[in-house]
Amino acid sequence: MTATQIVLVAIIAVAVLAALAAFSIASRKPGPDWRAGMDVRALREDRSRVLVAATPAPVTAEEEETQVTVEAPVESAGVRPVEVVKIEEVSADEAGVTRRQFFNRATLALFGTFSIAMGGSMLAFMWPNLKGGFGSDIDAGPIDEIRTQVFQADGSITPLFRPDARAYIVPITDEELAGSQFVDKSLAAGGFMALFQRCVHLGCRVPWCNTSQGFECPCHGSKYNYTGEYEAGPAPRNLDRFVVELQDDRFIIKTGQIIESPRAPEKSVSYPQGPSCIAIESAG
């Protein structure tokens, strides 16, 4: 199971867990309504209850004669206010969102946001960029212009480097292609191939050595001829390359399709054609 497949399985698992959590929170029902079993008249009486005042006690004639008129508090006049606490239940619509519902929805929103952000980041990291840049089809320009830049007046070659494709465009003749392991694999078009810049040993960028007419990795000394075939060092195989094609005489590099190839038993071109750049730097 590849790393890409493992990450995809992890994303699917997170999405399933998020869906289950959302369903679990959304399916929670409030407890039974205790008012459903009460009598309607009792509920109506509770809602209409107000402050109750005590009825003043009757006063006899004798008491009235002996009674002195005094401004007395309300209690002395026989009125005793009774404080009644009125508790009225409201409906769910009137009450709005309860604290429990608020926290449940907030938790769900945070978990959903985190899951979407993590899943989107993983997909953006793994998925090829189909709208331009590495991972898409790169237009390297007209084939005639590429030919002019690659072939030099002294008979040597200088690969054309395309930073957006992370590739070296190198020449290969029909005879060299026919005798190589790259024939009939859509790896050459218009007499050129596109080599991935990365060394297959530990991923260093492999620079071009003009004196030896090959690629030489400064990290651990792996060497390749100008068609990317393995020549020396700890690299396990040839340089990787991209599928290419011509569209209206324009060289198209399909950077979403990286092709690996084993070491060639017979090389299609000679190497080295001069001093090695690694040996020159070591001597210096």
Image (cartoon, rainbow, N blue to C red):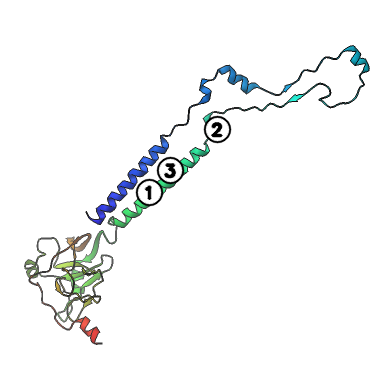
Q: Name the residue under label 3.
A: 108
The kind of residue on which mark 3 rests is Leu
User: In the image, what residue occupies the spot 38% across and 51% down?
Assistant: 117
Check disc 1 and report its element: helix, strand or loop. Answer: helix
User: For the view shown, which residue lies furthest in the bottom direction?
Assistant: 284
- Asked if 222 appears above or below 4 in the picture, the reply is below
Helix, strand or loop at mark 3: helix
**Residue 161: percent from left, percent from top:** 24, 71
Callout 2 environment at 10 Å: few (<14), some (14 to 19), or many (20+)?
few
First in sequence: mark 1 or mark 2?
A: 2
Position of 241 compared to 71: left or right? Answer: left
- State the image quarter where residue 175 is shown: bottom left
Quarter occupied by residue 109: top left
Q: Which amino acid does label 2 sit on?
A: Ala
Vertical order, 130 against 261 (above or below):
above
Left of 60 or right of it: where is 28?
A: left
Is disc 1 in contact with disc 3, using a CB cutoff of under 8 Å?
no
Q: What residue type is labelled 1?
A: Ser
Q: Name the residue under label 2.
A: 95
Q: Is label 3 in contact with label 2 (beta carbons under 8 Å)?
A: no
Q: Callout 3 environment at 10 Å: few (<14), some (14 to 19), or many (20+)?
A: some
Q: Position of residue 129 (x, y in %)?
A: 29, 57
* Residue 115, numbered circle: 1
Horizontal relation, residue 224 to residue 18: left or right: left
Q: Please tell me whether mark 2 sits on a helix, a strand or a loop.
A: helix
